[in-house]
Image (tube, rainbow, N blue to C red):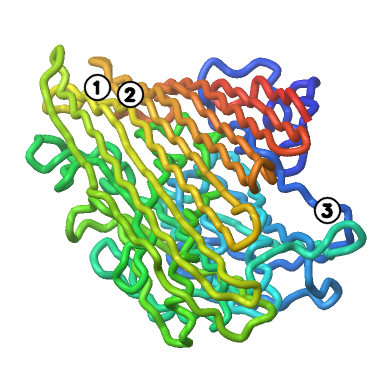
């Protein structure tokens, strides 16, 4: 049994829907058990309406066999719905690595996750995600496919016992039907070519808005899981890459670049050589891997001919033949409700020259690699719809600045300080009214160091920060505004090369999640842990 304090935090647990217990006095080091994993992220807000829940996955993952079944919409809660919420619940006990999970419904990826590493006594965790955007897909029976690839043997004993539920909330009273796309379209004939994913998409002939969604993750335990640590092939280091650490996710429509984005530097729960960092608090996005969204509306007029068109998603900077990137992709289409065909074309397509410069020098005994990269894209397209001409302009700027330092051939210590910026502005205008401008500014930062002492003591310190500022305006009016800050800091140490009971592992971590928005919305929660137990859980505003 876990040692629990008589004092409970006032805030409800974001993962699991219960009040988190606090350790009365954390142990001097990690033992064979610790608190269940959780995050400081808010639970999905749910409407006060009647609802129906459907279980779509019930599986014990112990190998690489996918789970398959068929989803049927709940007869007692026919759409349209105000909200649809996915909830994954998991249990695992024993010894196991972190594993990656991938859930598809109707050939569309609706959820990606990574799993926590278990204690000998066992842990339980849960994740919620708002999947209302996929409501058009969920309105009819669909095949379900889920895989959490796992290895179970005499050493790695943890079987991942997982259930996934969908809860459908009716649109009743003041809770109106959700404003979603008309169609959610999986790629047809998907195939891999090197680091790129290629496929085809056929959109409705009256499509007036188009968006693609890409779950871009470097994973698999090789160099591309830690792509930000790679160095140019001319520099001696264990993870070379032709052009260094700069990575950029691009999407193409019929061979033309249609969107650019910075990938998020995901760290899974075995990452950075130190699972003791993540046993209770995972890194930002580790349990709910969010997709990159590309607005493809400027291209819509070229695609409404009823024919299949090619989409390609690739990651710039990946060496030829190196595996490690997963790029599940789908398309959302909004139809013109009063028109049978939308016509149009590109007005402007301008892509800047990619800047990617890395320099290496010996600084105070350290090998130091400084990288500066950036790119810019601007596209405009016009559409003739039932409500007149509409011009959509998408402008994107991305950049990466990093300093990677390591010492000697042993690469010990090894650390990095890096910042990624991703700014996107979408302007939609027609005749006779103010244009609507949606601006998104994302900023990811990572600062960490791994070192091994002469006594074989491995220490990892790390800070990760996920920030976003999103605003939509029309003329002088602000229609929506949202700011997010998800900050993780941690330090953990253990002794290498000894039995588990002799590792003398210690670790502290803190996650603070802040969200502000319209109508004075405020969420501010912080969780701190020591040696596997929660020692503080505070919420500063409601």
Q: Position of residue 209 (x, y in %)?
A: 56, 68
Secondary structure of residue under mark 2:
strand
- According to the picture, the residue beneath numbered tag 3 turns out to be 47
- Please give the label number shown on residue 17: none
Q: Position of residue 515 (x, y in %)?
A: 65, 34
Q: Quadrant of residue 430?
A: bottom right
Q: Could you classify mark 1 by the number of other residues whose Cα lies within 10 Å: few (under 14), some (14-19), or many (20 or more)?
A: some
Q: Quadrant of residue 535?
A: top right
Q: Quadrant of residue 448?
A: top left
Q: Position of residue 394 (x, y in %)?
A: 45, 55
Relative placement, left or right, of 254 versus 150 is left
- According to the picture, the residue beneath numbered tag 1 turns out to be 413
Q: Tell me what residue is drawn at x 80 percent, y 27 percent.
A: 10
Q: How far apart are marks 1 and 3 (CA)?
A: 50 Å
Q: Distance between the residues labelled 3 and 2?
A: 44 Å
Which of the two discs, 3 and 2, labels the residue nearer the N terminus?
Answer: 3
Q: How far apart are marks 1 and 2 (CA)?
A: 7 Å
Which of the two discs, 1 and 3, labels the residue nearer the N terminus?
Answer: 3
- According to the picture, the residue beneath numbered tag 2 turns out to be 449
Which quadrant does the C terminus fall into? top right
């Amino acid at each position: 049994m876990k040692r629990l304090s008589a004092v409970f935090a006032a805030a409800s647990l974001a993962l699991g829907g219960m009040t988190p217990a606090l350790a009365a006095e954390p142990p001097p080091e990690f033992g064979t058990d610790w608190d269940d994993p959780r995050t400081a992220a808010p639970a999905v807000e749910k409407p006060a309406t009647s609802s129906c829940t459907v279980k779509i996955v019930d599986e014990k993952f112990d190998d690489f066999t996918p789970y398959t079944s068929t989803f049927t919409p709940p007869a007692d809660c026919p759409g349209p719905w105000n909200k649809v919420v996915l909830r994954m619940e998991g249990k695992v006990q024993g010894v196991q690595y972190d594993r990656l999970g991938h859930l598809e419904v109707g050939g569309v990826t609706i959820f990606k996750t990574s799993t926590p590493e278990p204690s000998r006594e066992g842990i339980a965790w849960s994740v919620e995600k708002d999947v209302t955007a996929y409501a058009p897909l969920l309105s009819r029976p669909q095949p379900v496919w889920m895989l959490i690839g796992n290895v179970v043997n005499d050493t790695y004993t943890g079987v991942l016992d997982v259930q996934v539920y969908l809860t459908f909330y009716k649109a009743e009273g003041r809770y109106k039907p959700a404003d979603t796309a008309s169609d959610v379209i999986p790629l047809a004939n998907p195939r891999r070519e090197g680091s790129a994913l290629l496929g085809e998409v056929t959109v409705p002939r009256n499509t007036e808005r188009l968006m693609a969604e890409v779950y871009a993750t470097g994973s698999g335990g090789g160099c591309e899981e830690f792509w930000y640590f790679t160095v140019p092939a001319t520099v001696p280091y264990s993870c070379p890459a032709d052009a260094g650490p700069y990575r950029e996710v691009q999407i193409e429509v019929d061979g033309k670049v249609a969107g650019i984005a910075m990938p998020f530097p995901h760290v899974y729960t075995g990452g950075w050589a130190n699972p003791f960092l993540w046993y209770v608090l995972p890194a930002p996005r580790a349990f709910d891997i969010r997709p990159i969204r590309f607005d493809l509306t400027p291209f819509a007029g070229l695609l409404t001919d009823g024919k299949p068109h090619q989409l390609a998603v690739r990651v710039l900077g990946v060496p030829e033949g190196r595996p490690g990137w997963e790029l599940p992709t789908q398309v959302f289409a909004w139809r013109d409700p009063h028109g049978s065909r939308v016509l149009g074309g590109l007005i402007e397509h301008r892509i800047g020259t990619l800047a990617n410069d890395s320099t290496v020098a010996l600084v105070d005994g350290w090998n130091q690699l400084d990288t500066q990269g950036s790119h810019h894209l601007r596209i405009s397209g016009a559409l003739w719809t039932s409500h007149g001409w509409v011009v959509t302009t998408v402008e994107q700027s991305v950049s990466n600045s990093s300093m990677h330092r390591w010492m000697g051939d042993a690469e010990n210590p090894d650390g990095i300080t890096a910042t990624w910026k991703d700014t996107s502005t979408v302007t939609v205008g027609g005749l006779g009214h103010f244009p609507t401008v949606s601006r998104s500014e994302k900023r990811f930062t990572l600062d960490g160091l791994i070192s091994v002492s002469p006594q074989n003591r491995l220490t990892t310190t790390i800070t990760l920060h996920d920030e976003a500022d999103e605003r939509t305006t029309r003329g002088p009016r602000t229609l929506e505004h949202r700011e997010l800050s998800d900050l993780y800091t941690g330090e953990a140490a253990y002794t290498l090369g000894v039995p588990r009971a002799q590792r003398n592992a210690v670790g502290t971590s803190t996650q603070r999640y802040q969200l502000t928005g319209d109508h004075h919305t405020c969420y501010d929660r912080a969780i701190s842990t020591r040696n596997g137990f929660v020692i503080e859980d505070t919420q500063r505003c409601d």
